[in-house]
Amino acid sequence: MITHASIIPENTTLETEICIVGGGPAGITLALELSGQPFRVILLEGGEIKYDSVGQSLYRGTNIGLHYEDLHQSRSRFFGGSSNCWAGFCRQFDEHDFEFRDWVPNSGWPITLADLRPHYYRAHELLQLGPVNFDPRVWEDLIGRPDARMIKFDRERAINIIAQVSPPTRLGQLYRDDLARSGNVSTYLGASVTEIETPGAGSAVTGLRVRTLAGGGFRVVAQTYVLATGGIETPRLMLASNRYQPAGVGNHYDVVGRYFMDHPRLRSGEIVFRNPECNSRIYDMHSTLARKMTARGVRVSGFFGLTPETQRAERVANTRCCVKSRFIGDSRETNLAALTLFRAIGERRPLRDRSRKEVIRLLTHLPQVTMMAAGLKLNLPILTRGFTLETVVEPTPLPDSRVTLSSERDALGVPRVKVDWRLGELEKRTIRRTQEILGEELARAGAGEVLVDAPREGEPWPDSIVGCWHHMGTARMHADPRKGVVDSDCRVHGINNLFIAGSSVFPTCGSDTPTINIVALALRLAQHIKCQYGIDAATRVDWHTASSDSVERTEVFGRAAANEAGSGSAVAALTGRGG
């Protein structure tokens, strides 16, 4: 059942066994996995079924750290959550992402890749991906095109990386009917949770206060609660729920809201392919997305990275690089104008909701955006002006990079947020050394060179440094409640019936593409909850029992190619928002 919260009479109390707060990738995944079970589930989504500017305004906040996208523009407050502004890139965590690394402050997870690995199979199904295989050699052979050959590095320093690209899956659209037909999951739209009630010692949640923009309000009482509201709204709600616990829910040690992370993305430096045979379109994010580099209906994208051994020897974090072809009129302003257009078309967000400055920039640079789109669509060499290197790097989890509350309140009376995004010197070292090593290995392979243009340690960040809209780390997982908010089962320390799903629990976040890992972690949590209720929660393997090393033996999902030619695909390639 899907209905609107405004129909619930004032001061009603809804009772259920499980309550999920948030209808994004994590929340919808949980609801789908708990559907059909012998217990009741309520899913509360604060937004509407489609984009709504009034509801979106509840996401407004203040940036007080590094320059960051306006907070109400980098998130999507409607059914499907962040999947509504997702470019579709998917790649599972690397094994060493979970490890303690003495050169990466606050690194290390209390779980390993082996704990998540069984759940990636179902994640691939939900996100309309192909088989769980990311071997570059396999995909190179399957594509079988001369412009999709990958550079052969002859020593273990630089490597090729493959990501699969979802259509992208808009979970709210794709699974709306499944949830509407569910017999045990009741979904309420326009249901904004404004308070988590934890009276007394705060060891249990006793209820949630819910309000609607229409003015109504009610309570939800459950046995088990799951917050799946993202890396900004999760700490916001926990900190704002301070009627019983002055520091906020689960915040005995002042960890909630700290360690805020986003993947820094720097478009700098130039890659020069000296050997035309090495100028592979599979590395060009523009070409890959716009031309749909596919094999058996699955889109893929190629990147450059560093081996774990090189990362350890160089004492750098995880990273990946892609190539972006440049066209006549290409500039930072042109790319920002293209992003505005992408959000208006691809996400159906009207231009009237953008600032006057953004609209003027779009109109001013529309000819250049058109020229770039033509270059992508037609692949005309006359429009190409070389290749820029774009590097995305794993951010350092810093306690002073954080989300806090401001004195301003939104229309529902909830304090708005302040985001203080900070980066460390490790990120600068990682970006520069990655570019330098990549240049050395390209030259060694006779493929080309990299003209490095990245800041050194101690130098200021350039204005061109941006995030990827990946909000992570603010309710991090750690065995020690003094260093984390949730334990290895995603349960909030000290609260026996409150769990958190989503990227806010990530202690570290790898080099990119959080969505597939959010879904896998939510699937693991769903399994844990089923076990709590006595349900046999054996991990689904069905067709996935085929060897992941053999793509040929594995059928690609029927939905994998659906919506692949969705609106705004060429402009999406220009903006390059990640996973």
Image: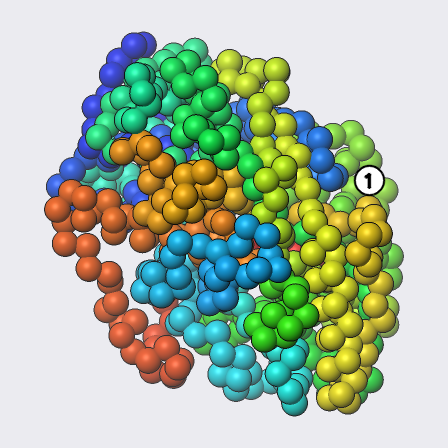
- Residue under the point 75% across and 82% down: 442
Q: Is mark 1 on a helix, strand or loop?
A: helix
* Quadrant assignment for the C terminus: bottom right
Q: Is residue 16 above or below residue 100?
A: above
Foreground pick, 126 / 245: 245
Foreground pick, 238 / 250: 250
Q: In this view, does 297 lie to the left or right of 445?
A: left
The quadrant where residue 250 appears: top left
Residue 487: x and y in percent read 36, 44
Residue 303 visible in this rendered orientation of the protein: no
- Residue under the point 38% across and 12% down: 216
Q: In this view, does 377 lie above or below 334?
A: below
User: Residue tagged by mark 1?
Assistant: 361
The quadrant where residue 276 appears: bottom right
Q: How crowded is mark 1: few (under 14 residues within 10 Å), some or many (20 or more)?
A: some
- Residue under the point 21% across and 30% down: 223
Q: In this view, does 407 lie to the left or right of 220?
A: right
Residue 474: x and y in percent read 51, 39
Q: In this view, does 72 lie to the left or right of 432?
A: left
Residue 575: x and y in percent read 69, 53
* Quadrant assignment for the N terminus: top left
Q: Is residue 96 above or below residue 350?
A: below
Report the amino acid beneath label 1: Arg
Foreground pick, 538 / 90: 538
Residue 397 visible in this rendered orientation of the protein: yes
Residue 183: x and y in percent read 18, 39
Q: Is residue 418 above or below residue 149?
A: above
